[in-house]
Amino acid sequence: MRIASGIISLVLGFAVLFQSCAVAGLGSFVAPDSTTGAVGMLVGILLLIGGAFSFQLPKVSVVICIIAALFAGIEAMNDFPDMKVWAVLCLILAVMNFFGGRKPKAPITNDPPAPSP
C-alpha cells in the first residue's frame, strides 16, 4: 500500500502543480492581484514531499497529506473550487498512508518450545 500511495501522491502532486501554475499564470492576465494559484502550488509541492516520504516514513506522509488537505480546503472556499477535489484526494492518501504504515501483527505460533539438551 505504501508504494501505491507514494506513486499516486507523486502523480497527483505533479498534476496539482501543473494546474496551479496554469491558473496562476493565466490568472495574472485577468486579475494581477490574484494569489489563487500560489496556495495550489504549495499543495502540489506538499503532495510531492508526502509522496517521497510515503515509501519509508508513511507516518510523516500522513501529516504532510493532512496539511496539504487543509490548505486545499481553505483555498477551495476562496476562489479555486477545483481544490475541493484535491483536498478529498489528499485525505484519501493520508488514510492510505496511515494503514500502509501500520506494522503487521506478529503471527501467533502454537509450536511447543524446543527441548533443551
Image (tube, rainbow, N blue to C red):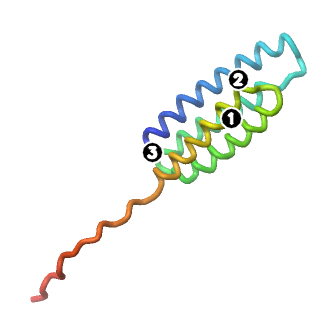
Q: Which amino acid does the dot numbered 3 rest on?
A: Arg
**Res. 51 mark:** none
| Residue at disc 3, secondary structure | helix
Q: Which amino acid does the dot numbered 2 rest on?
A: Ser
Few, some or many residues within 10 Å of mark 3 (<14, 14–19, 20+): many
Residue under numbered circle 2: 20
Residue under numbered circle 3: 2
| Residue at disc 1, secondary structure | helix
Gap in Å between the C-alphas at discs 3 and 2? 26 Å
At a point 47% along the width and 49% down the height, the residue shown is: 56
Q: Residue 26 at x, y = what percent?
A: 77, 13
Q: Are marks 1 and 2 in contact (CB under 8 Å)?
A: yes
**Res. 43 mark:** 1
Q: Which tag, 3 or 2, sits closer to the chain's start?
A: 3
Res 51 → quadrant: top right
Image position of 40 with respect to 28: above or below: below
Along the line of sight, which residue is nearer the eye, 112 or 29? 112
